[in-house]
Amino acid sequence: MKMSGVAILFGVSVAAAAYLAYRYLGDASPVGRVTVVLRRETFAVDLADTPSRRERGLSGRERLAADEGMLFRFDAPARQSFWMRGMKIPIDIVWIAGGEVAGVEEHAEPEPGVPLWRLKTYTSPEPVAEVLELVAGTVTRLGIARGDAVEVKWGER
């Protein structure tokens, strides 16, 4: 009887440790990469397609090249809200619905030292299933506007 109690306690401990590792360390699998074409410009972007990858996003990145970014993919279109928690670089946010730009947010700035509940939130202008984050200034540089076609090339690097 004493041994089965130890086994149960061990099993519960292992399950709790696995949950905490997933929740706080994130998805350990490699981040996928896809190619996004927007205004004849090609971007090699990381794919954030799981809850933990979306939560982590670009947080902690020291830099982002002009042809890099992150594509957030959601299961269904909805109004998406983003914040700059843990961000070190300013970005442009491109809201995507049905393969087209639904709106943009230019030059979202990091807010170091700001408590979570006071961080500015950026919300899509309509329900979207994809959100593209690019280095700040890209929207202006390329003249990205509502209605522009966005092509995501799955499985290509």
Image (cartoon, grey):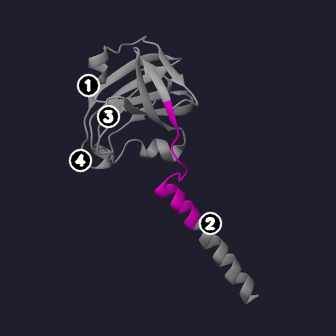
Q: Secondary structure at mark 1?
A: loop
Q: Residue at x 65, y 77 (%)?
A: 9
- Labels 2 and 4: the sequence-earlier one: 2
Comparing labels 3 and 1, the label whose residue is closer to the camera:
3
Comparing labels 2 and 1, the label whose residue is closer to the camera:
1
Contact between marks 3 and 1 (CB within 8 A): the answer is no
- Labels 2 and 1: the sequence-earlier one: 2
Residue 137: give its label.
1
- Which amino acid lies under the numbered mark 4 shown in the image of this protein? Pro
What are the residue bounds of the magenta stretch? 17-34
- Which amino acid lies under the numbered mark 2 shown in the image of this protein? Ala
Name of the residue lying farthest toward the front: 157
Residue receiving disc 2: 15
Q: x, y (%) of residue 82?
A: 39, 36
Q: CA distance from mark 2 to mark 4?
A: 34 Å
Q: Residue at x 27, y 29 (%)?
A: 136
Residue receiving disc 4: 112
Residue 150 visible in the picture: yes
Q: CA distance from mark 2 to mark 1?
A: 45 Å
In front of the other: 7 or 65: 65
In front of the other: 103 or 114: 103
Comparing labels 4 and 3, the label whose residue is closer to the camera:
3
Q: Is residue 31 magenta?
A: yes
Q: Secondary structure at mark 3?
A: loop
- Which amino acid lies under the numbered mark 3 shown in the image of this protein? Ala
Comparing labels 2 and 3, the label whose residue is closer to the camera:
3
Q: CA distance from mark 2 to mark 3?
A: 39 Å
Residue 126 visible in the picture: no
Residue receiving disc 3: 65
